[in-house]
């Protein structure tokens, strides 16, 4: 701090990894989320847009189906990767 002026110094970031696109896909068929391409045994969490957990399950046989009762937008998390989907 010098005379009320802030000075910022930027340095090269170390230890950060480039964000990768999710490796899984989600198809919405009626009120069913069809999750493909996720690692076998991975945990699937589905949240509403208020952050409430709506469903949790595990990936089985490479494809998993999750039934969603209400229309709306949801966040699907598989391991640490996420996708946003709209159920109509």
Image: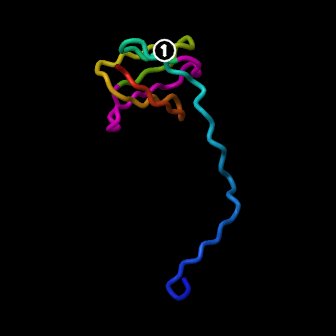
Callout 1 secondary element: strand
Can you name the residue that lies furthest to the left here? 70
Name, please, the residue furthest toward the bottom. Answer: 3
Name the residue at 60% across, 26% down. Answer: 23
Q: Quadrant of the N terminus?
A: bottom right
Q: What residue range appears in magenta?
A: 36-54
Q: Position of residue 14 (x, y in %)?
A: 69, 56
Question: Does the magenta segment cover residue 63?
Answer: no
Quarter assignment of residue 30: top left
Total number of numbered labels? 1
Q: Residue at x 36, y 15 (%)?
A: 31
Query: Could you say where residue 75 lies in the image, as x and y percent from the top left?
Result: 42, 31
Residue denoted by label 1: 64
Could you tell me residue 32's position as x and y percent? Answer: 39, 14
Asked if residue 34 is positioned above or below residue 24 in the image, the reply reads above
Q: Is residue 37 magenta?
A: yes
- The x, y position of residue 47, in whole percent, is 37, 31
């Amino acid at each position: 701090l010098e005379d009320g002026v802030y000075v910022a110094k930027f340095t090269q970031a170390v230890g950060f990894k480039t964000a990768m696109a999710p490796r899984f896909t989600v198809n919405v068929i009626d009120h069913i989320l069809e999750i493909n391409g996720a690692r076998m045994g991975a945990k699937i969490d589905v949240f509403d847009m208020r952050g409430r957990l709506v469903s949790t399950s595990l990936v089985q046989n490479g494809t998993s189906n999750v039934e969603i009762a209400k229309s709306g937008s949801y966040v699907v998390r598989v391991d640490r990767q996420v996708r946003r989907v709209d159920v109509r």
